[in-house]
Structure formats: structure tokens, C-alpha cells
Amino acid sequence: MKQWRSGSRNTLNARAITQKDMVKLVQTMDDDGLFALITPKAIKWYYGMYEVKKSSVQKVWGLSDWQMRSVHQYIYENDPFYDYLRGRGDERGNTDID
């Protein structure tokens, strides 16, 4: 499981993700090469150029169902990966993500 927040991981229930922790989580995901795209139907997760399942992201990052819904809500409200993707493009220099 990826380490992205401070404090004990040995808790009986999942802690809410604070705004500060959410920013840190998204930045850590980004640093790891994981990003999310908002599509007309849902949020799609990618690791590099490969699409990954939401459940895999959830498992690797140690997120409960409730925490994952919070992450998705944050992404819908802020689209934190958009600016990064606009500047990065792919290996061929294509920056068109539409």
C-alpha cells in the first residue's frame, strides 16, 4: 500500500481525507505516474498510458469506498490532473487530451 498520509494506518475505520491530505494524495499519485481523466461517463484512471480499474487504484492506495468517492468528488470539482496533462502530453509530444 502506498504511503501518502501521516498518522497511524492501524485504525478500526477509515479516516476522512482532509483538504490538505487530498492535495498530498493527488500530488503523490501524480508523482507516481497515476492520473485520472474526467470523461462523459465516469472518471478513468491511468498509469502511464495504461488504463487501470478504480478498484485497483483503491487497493494500492489503501482507500475505502467512502474515501474513493471523496477522491472522485475532489477530482470532479477541481480537475487536478488537467493542467499537468496539458503540459505533459504523451511520448510523441501530443498534448491534445480532448
Image (cartoon, grey):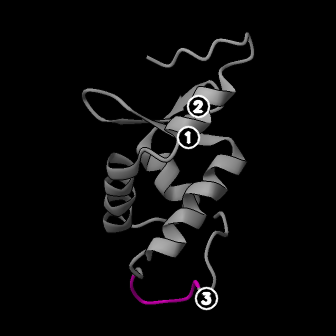
- Amino acid carrying mark 2 in the image: Leu
Asked if residue 22 is positioned above or below residue 55 in the image, the reply reads below
Residue located 32% across and 51% down the image: 77
The residue singled out by tag 3 in the image is 7
> SS at mark 2?
helix
The residue singled out by tag 2 in the image is 85
Instruction: Name the quarter where the C terminus is drawn.
Output: top left
Q: Which is more toward the observer, 3 or 81?
A: 81
For residue 10, which quarter of the picture? bottom right
- Please give the range of residues in magenta: 9-13
Cα distance between the residues tagged 3 and 1: 25 Å
Disc with the residue nearer the chain's start (2 vs 1): 1
The residue singled out by tag 1 in the image is 35
The picture places residue 96, in percent across and down from the top left corner, at: 54, 14
Q: Which is more toward the observer, 95 or 68?
A: 95
Say if mark 2 contacts mark 1, CB within 8 Å.
yes
- Residue 38 part of the magenta-drawn span: no
Q: Residues within 10 Å of mark 1 (few under 14, many from 20)?
A: many
> SS at mark 3?
loop
Cα distance between the residues tagged 2 and 1: 9 Å
Residue located 68% across and 41% down the image: 33
